[in-house]
Amino acid sequence: MLKAERSNGVIVCSFELTNKLNSINSDAVKKEAGGHFEVPGTRLIMDLGNISFIDSSGFGALLSLMRRARTNSGILRICNVTPGVMKVFRLLQLDKVFEIYGSREECLESFS
């Protein structure tokens, strides 16, 4: 479900074969992406470019990943949030909780 790539020591996870982050796949996302944070100091980007819908379980998964990152001295950042999904981030005020970047390149540069 997630495609993980490395770029300059940063793991970039993007979604394949789905355009939703919801109760159906949120546990799998937490397990798959969260496994990267077993290594202390992991820097990870969640690229939400293909995601057009997130429900409460999906946001819960992202918050869980953020806690896991912080617990292991890691960093989680988000990029490529579609306009519709960004409206929900803002409505829930999660745009103040997560570091969100417009593009993958901008997000990668933020680690420099």
Image: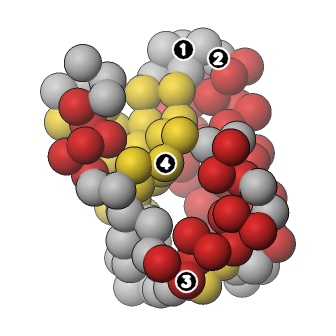
Residue 67 picture location, percent across and down: 75, 33
Residue 38 occupies quadrant:
top right
Label 3 vs label 4: CA separation? 14 Å
> Does residue 19 appear to the left or right of 34 in the view shown?
left
Q: Amino acid at mark 1?
A: Pro
Q: Residue at x 44, y 76 (%)?
A: 82
Residue 27 picture location, percent across and down: 72, 64
Label 1 vs label 3: CA separation? 33 Å
> Does residue 110 appear to the left or right of 45 in the view shown?
left
Residue 76 picture location, percent across and down: 53, 36
Which of the two residues, 25 or 48, is positioned nearer the viewer here? 48
> Does residue 21 appear to the left or right of 78 in the view shown?
right
**Residue corresponding to mark 2:** 72
Q: Are the residues at dot 2 and dot 1 in contact (C-beta closer than 8 Å)?
A: yes
Could you classify mark 4 by the number of other residues whose Cα lies within 10 Å: few (under 14), some (14-19), or many (20 or more)? many
Could you classify mark 2 by the number of other residues whose Cα lies within 10 Å: few (under 14), some (14-19), or many (20 or more)? some
